[in-house]
Amino acid sequence: MYTPNPINTDDITLSEDLLALTEQIATNVHDVWAAGRIKEGWTYGEIKNTEEKTTPCLVPYGELPESEKEYDRNTAIETLKLIIKLGYKITRKDMGT
């Protein structure tokens, strides 16, 4: 039986800049997911139906219910925290150069 064992990132605090970045990452996570579903033949539908390949989540990120957005945000936040936990530094390139 599979027992998930994610790396604990509770000791990592994200900076304000990285917290602001999470919404952009969450939007992209949703878009990548949606593109994959569409490629697999899924379409928008009022209810999720795996046989007919319909889902109500094939909408732009901004139109998702807050519960779905929270799932994508959590993925973004935990990914950023893991990167830092593993010793990497995230910096923003100066856009003026």
Image (cartoon, helix red, strand yellow):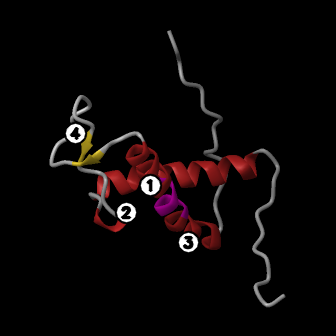
Q: Which of marks 4 and 3 is nearer the N terminus?
A: 3
In the depicted structure, whether residue 5 falls above or below residue 89: above
Residue 9 is left or right of residue 52, and the answer is right
Q: Is the magenta stretch mostly helix, strand or loop?
A: helix
Q: What is the spatial separation of the Cα atoms under label 4 and label 3, in whole angstroms?
A: 31 Å
Q: What is the spatial separation of the Cα atoms under label 2 and label 1, in whole angstroms?
A: 6 Å
Residue 86 is left or right of residue 63, and the answer is right
Residue 28: in magenta span? yes
Q: Three-letter amino acid code at disc 4? A: Lys
**Nearest the eye: 74 or 14:** 74
Magenta residues, as a range? 25-30
Q: Where is residue 4 in the image (x, y as percent from the top left)?
A: 54, 24
SS type, badge 2: helix
What residue sits right under mark 2 in the picture? Answer: 61
Residue 20 circle label? 3
Residue drawn 84% across the image and 87% down it: 97
Residue 96 is left or right of residue 20, and the answer is right
Give the quarter of the image for residue 60: bottom left
Q: Earlier in the sequence, mark 2 or mark 4?
A: 4
What residue sits right under mark 1 in the picture? Answer: 30
In the depicted structure, whether residue 44 falls above or below residue 19: above
Residue 67 is left or right of residue 1, and the answer is left
Of the residues tagged 3 and 2, which is closer to the observer?
A: 2
Q: Where is residue 87 in the image (x, y as percent from the top left)?
A: 82, 49
Q: Earlier in the sequence, mark 1 or mark 3?
A: 3
Q: What is the spatial separation of the Cα atoms under label 3 and label 2, in whole angstroms?
A: 16 Å
Q: Three-letter amino acid code at disc 2? A: Tyr
What residue sits right under mark 4 in the picture? Answer: 48
Q: Which of marks 1 and 4 is nearer the N terminus?
A: 1
Q: How crowded is mark 4: few (under 14 residues within 10 Å), some or many (20 or more)?
A: some
Q: Earlier in the sequence, mark 2 or mark 1?
A: 1
